[in-house]
Each structure stands twice: as C-alpha cells, then as structure tokens.
Amino acid sequence: MMAPAEIIFRDMPRSEALERRILEKINKLEQLHDHITSCNVIVEETHQHKHRGKLFHIRINLTVPERELVVSHEKHDKQEHEDPYVAVRDAFKAMHRQLTDYSQRLRGSVKAHSRPDTPVVPPPDLVLD
C-alpha cells in the first residue's frame, strides 16, 4: 500500500488541474507495480530569459522495495517543456520505463547475457606434435 503522494509546486502557484493529472499518472504507475511505497513529485517553474519563456522541471522520486527510482526532467533546450503538462508527461514516461525495467529484473525476465564459449587454445610453445 502506498502512502499518499506528495506533490510540491515550487516558484509557481498550485494548479489543481495539473495536480489531478499527476495523480492520474501516479495511479497508472501503481497499476504497473503494486509494491510502490511512496511517490514524491516536484514541479518547478524555472525562470529563463524573456525570449525563451518559462520552462518546467519535473522531479519524481518513487520508492519501491529495496530501491528508489528517480527521474529528473530538466530539458532547458526543449521548447515543448514550456507546457507543464508536456513536461509531466515526459517525466512520467521515463519513470514508467524505469519501473518496467525494475519489475522485469525482479521477475527475472530480463535476459542475462552469457559469455560466448571460447575454445581454450594453448600457447604455441606448448603444442605437442
């Protein structure tokens, strides 16, 4: 059972609509992996030059048994992160990938790469004729 999610807005006013969207994304993560113990999301508006506009930095800390998964999406070069909903979408996509990889490793369904069988060749001075 997960503790209530903590959503923090920094350098910007709280948005109920954005908070609802974040909670929807967290619920989707809970459906993917049912042993999430906590989730903290920080939405921060970074102040850029006037000609570039404001960009959004999203940080997600997700705690699962024996691990903490972190996504910190700070894409100053991406124009689309001027929209907080797009920044949240991209951050949660990255967290979804991390959580999927973690779940697969737990189940053991990640293929282990074996070393190829290499024949043992004796050094030339030990070759018997």
Image (spheres, grey):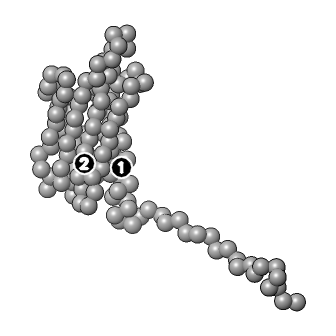
Quick check: 79 above or below 116?
Answer: above
Quick check: 32 above or below 75?
Answer: below
Residue 19 in the image, given as x and y percentages of width and height: 17, 32
Identity of the residue drawn at 18% across and 50% down: 38
Classify 10 Å Cα crowding around label 2: few (below 14), some (14-19), many (20 and above): many
Taking the image as drawn, is residue 21 in sight? yes
Of the pair 32 and 2, the residue shown nearer to us? 2
Could you tell whether 10 is left or right of 106 in the image?
A: left
| Local secondary structure at mark 1 | helix
Identity of the residue drawn at 23% across and 52% down: 63
Inspect the image, locate mark 1, and give the three-letter code of the amino acid beneath it: Gln
Displayed quadrant of residue 46: top left
Q: Which residue is mark 1?
A: 98
Of the pair 5 and 20, the residue shown nearer to us? 5
Residue 18 in the image, given as x and y percentages of width and height: 20, 28
Say the numbered circle drawn on residue 62. 2
